[in-house]
Amino acid sequence: MKVRAPEAPKSFPAFVLLAFAVLWMALVILLPLVNVLAEAFKQGVAPYLSSIVQPDALSAIRLTLLVAAIAVPLNAVFGIAAAWCFTRFDFPLKGLLLSILDLPFTISPVISGIVWVLLFGAHGWFGAFLQANDIKIIYALPGLVIATILVTLPFVARELIPLMQDQGTDEEIAAVTLGASGWDVFFRVTLPNIKWALTYGVLLCTARAMGEFGAVSVVSGHIRGLTNTLPLHIEVLYNEYDSVGAFAAATLLAGLALVTLVLKSLLEWRFADELAAHRRH
Amino acid sequence: MSLVVKNITKCFSDFAALNDVSFQAEPGEFLALLGPSGSGKTTLLRLLAGLDQPDTGSVEFDGADYLKLSARDRRIGMVFQSYALFRHMTVAQNIAFGLNVRPAKERPSKAEIAATVQRLLKLIQLEDLGKRYPSQLSGGQRQRVALARALAISPRMLLLDEPFGALDALVRKDLRRWLRKIHDETGVTTIFVTHDQEEALDLADRVVVLKDGQIEQIGKPLELYRHPQSAFVFEFLGTSNEVPATVSDGVASFDGFTAPAVSPKALSGAQTVRFRPFDAQLSPTGPGFEAKVLSLLPAGSSLRLELQTPDGKVFETQHAHESEASDLKLGDTVFVRPSKVYVF
Ligand SMILES: Nc1ncnc2c1ncn2[C@@H]1O[C@H](COP(=O)(O)OP(=O)(O)OP(=O)(O)O)[C@@H](O)[C@H]1O
Ligand SMILES: [Mg+2]
């Protein structure tokens, strides 16, 4: 069921609004994007390529992908479990917990980073204990991962909760009466019904995990080649007036974002049909 | 005796949704559970299916204690008002689900499952639609698929919770007949929940009337209709008119005339008595309750009248087309005499 395309604006105010929206988008989205490309290739293709393949850049790319590869699956599992609990059970303080789930959306990412420093940093609550046992969390991979997890915590759950609420428990109950075990119910009924929303949530989560700056910046310590993710690497280069290097790395990050965006759009298109089918159901 | 339910009570916090409910079903019987909204029908069905546990009481099936079995192990086919078909599976996959999730040892072979699906598709007269998805079916078709899916597991008992509630009157009637036919062919003990008295009386071998979580009456449809045990059952099974009368020895006396009075409790004295629309006689002169004709409606093979007394009370009566009512016009004054009344 496709929605009929809206008509082109006929009245003058509508036209003005449209023109403003288009101009605004060009100004704040397109212009910077073009600028990134222009700056990156200012001195030609060779400097661009050489700044991308330098070891620090490569290690930043690797680290970014690694952090996302750990944080996103964990958040996906958490999201499914949380959505399951919130939509399938009633318990006290449910509303409050749901709001808390949204906290990472509303608080500044810097705070999401600082809380970990306060807990695991040298002068934090567990600092002495960690130091005594030679466990490094802050200024190391674990710190980057937990900061990223916190920032991207709600993405999958928030995508699933409305859908699972909407779908209700009827199908699961029917499956049980037909003799399905708990695993059968989950893998044959629940999961297939949420797979598109889940994929969508995972994509959003991935995009955010790779692009996260604030929280990661606090726990990273900016050790070049070791704890610099791509966004941090860009900042370092930029501060050192290596604009080609900074913008070249930025094209990579923007590229990752664009890939995610295309996948997301494809999914939305796919997902819309499914959703429409669900509504008709 | 196939199903024996004894003294079931179920409370939600301190509200008793079911209160001391007991009934039985013979093997192969078709039982209707009839009651107004909120009377506890769904709650009872969920307890039978094992989706909830009662606070007290017992449920036995063929001598086995069913409360000890999980929903999964009871092998009860359930059909929901909302269909609850698996939306991401085709019709054939939906029907095969219950067989596919059996433990490997008990699972029939692929060919056997396919054969069962074909047989059931034929039974529900949707042989060509096995590859469709639920969203591509009409409501009536979906409900038939839901029934086939429940039948596929060779259920010990079939529970249907207002299965035709969301369908229009014509389709309902059709499916009702069809369901009864399928029941007679398969012989599976069936409990059918509805709040539509016509549906219950039309379909069931026996009807259990529920009210506020308690059983009001159990009986064969005709029995229920002829010998209602309470005002609630009387009113729930059809239109009822109320008038005051003096009752003694099975006779109700009115101002200038009498009528036979049916009562489960042999009541006497001044009582409110009730009569059905077709247990009313009209005449142009008294004795009787004076009333004006408010509306005249042809209702199939009969004529339905609404009559208003001078003090504002409205009677609904029903008459043959060729009768004392056929010459009446709106606004005419007539006298109504109940010819048979019920006292509770
Ligand atoms: N999970 C629950 N928690 C609290 N109260 C409940 C719950 N389920 C049912 N009830 C209450 O129990 C009573 C019986 O509900 P039930 O769903 O069995 O009614 P019903 O006869 O099926 O009605 P309907 O014809 O509207 O489906 C209602 O008053 C309902 O509010
Ligand atoms: Mg109900």
Image: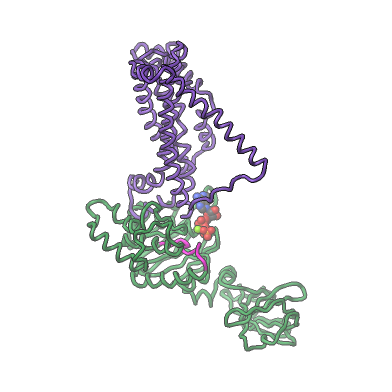
Chain colours: A purple, B green
User: Observer-nearest residue: B259 or A206?
Assistant: A206
User: Observer-nearest residue: B15 or B195?
Assistant: B195
- Where in the figure is residue B136, as x and y percent of width and height? 42, 58
Q: Is residue B69 left or right of residue B19?
A: left
- Where in the figure is residue B210, as x and y percent of width and height? 52, 63
A263 vs A137: above or below: below
User: Observer-nearest residue: B309 or B180?
Assistant: B180
Question: Which residue sits furthest front?
Answer: A44
- Where in the figure is residue B268, as x and y percent of width and height? 64, 76
User: Observer-nearest residue: B13 or B306?
Assistant: B306
Q: Is residue B26 left or right of residue B208?
A: left
Q: Which residues are magenta?
A: B159-168
- Where in the figure is residue B228, as x and y percent of width and height? 55, 73
Res. A111 visible in picture: yes
User: Which residue sits at x=47%, y=12%?
Assistant: A239
B309 vs A280: above or below: below
User: Which residue sits at x=36%, y=56%?
Assistant: B90
User: Which residue sits at x=43%, y=22%?
Assistant: A250
Q: Was residue B167 drawn as part of the magenta stretch in this picture? A: yes
Question: Which residue sits furthest right?
Answer: B310
Q: Was residue A44 drawn as part of the magenta stretch in this picture? A: no
Res. B1 visible in picture: no
